[in-house]
Image: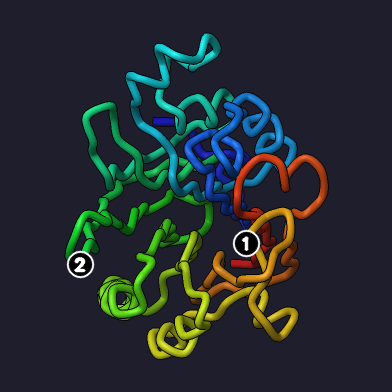
Amino acid sequence: MSQPLNGGQRVESLHLLTVNTHKGFTALNRRFILHELREAVRDVSADLVFLQEVLGTHERHARRHRNWPETPQYEFLADSMWGDFAYGRNAVYPDGDHGNAVLSKYPIQRYDNLDISVTGPERRGLLHCELEVPGQPQVHAICVHLGLLESHRQKQLGLLCELIDSLPAEARILVAGDFNDWRLRASACLRRCGLVEVFEHSHGRCARTFPARLPLLRLDRIYLRNATPQVARVLSHTPWPHLSDHLPLAAEVRL
């Protein structure tokens, strides 16, 4: 377990990044770009990174690509910059598995992956991490990837609210990921459990993130409870539009 930063001094704010990694390939799977993605993620230098569609293993890809990392993708992305990481495996298939991950500069005291799959082959999860942040009694990070069907998302949002409601009222809660909420119904539901979306707070609307090269849909989100958005940005500059089919979101939040 890594040691707290800042010599134990109280941490007043956190820099967050959420990105759908598209399993380390470009949008149409034409090129393996995980190494470029790692450099781009490192350049943001976030305290917490929320990853969706990150591979744990994939035997066929490992045989086909010479530069395939020896470690799982989330560990490769963490490198030496994020001392702790957690992985929630959602989908398993003959060649490997993928899911959500959280990379943290602060120790992850415990984590749990909640299966929120509804029916059929689509597997989804909520990766819930409890962090040790100096001077903050409870900080919870939840990485989200919701389903493609509206009926599934509504049930999954209900499960997310149940998780939020189970946490102490004073806890700082950071929720980020790919909500697939193209009909813009998630925020009304999540406001009932006290969550505020950072772009709605700062700009009046959720950010356009998909497809990355011409973003039209507002699929990716960062929600907070007991924390205040300071800065919220869509990372639309080079090289991000070439690294995934989603644009990442970054936010500075005050605890």
Where's the C terminus, which quadrant? bottom right
**Residue occupying image coordinates x 57% and y 53%:** 18
Badge 1 or badge 2: first in the primary sequence: 2
Q: Can the viewer see residue 168?
A: no
Label 1 sits on what residue type? Answer: Phe
Task: Give the numbered dot on residue 140.
Answer: none
The answer to which of 253 and 219 lies nearer the viewer is 219
The residues bearing labels 1 and 2 have C-alpha atoms spaced at a distance of 24 Å
Quadrant containing the N terminus in the rendered view: top left
Vertical arrangement, residue 176 with respect to residue 227, above or below: above
For label 1, the SS is loop
Q: Is residue 52 left or right of residue 153?
A: right
Q: Where is residue 160 in the image (x, y as percent from the top left)?
A: 32, 72
Q: Residue at x 68, y 28 (%)?
A: 36
40 left or right of 123?
right
Q: Do the residues labelled 1 and 2 touch (CB within 8 Å)?
A: no
Q: Which image quarter: residue 125?
A: bottom left
**Residue 211, visible in the rendered structure:** yes
Q: Is residue 226 left or right of residue 232?
A: left
Q: Residue 144: horizontal and vertical position, in percent?
A: 41, 60
Question: Which residue sits at x=69%, y=30%?
Answer: 39
Tag 2 secondary structure: loop
Q: Neighbour class for label 1 at 10 Å: few (<14), some, many (≥20)?
A: many
In the image, taking residue 90 as reference, residue 254 lies left or right, namely right
Q: Name the residue under label 1.
A: 210
Report which residue position mark 2 lands on: 118
User: Splitting the image into 4 quarters, where does residue 130 fall?
Assistant: bottom left
Q: Residue at x 55, y 68 (%)?
A: 219
Q: Position of residue 207 (x, y in %)?
A: 67, 71
> What's the residue type where badge 2 is placed?
Val
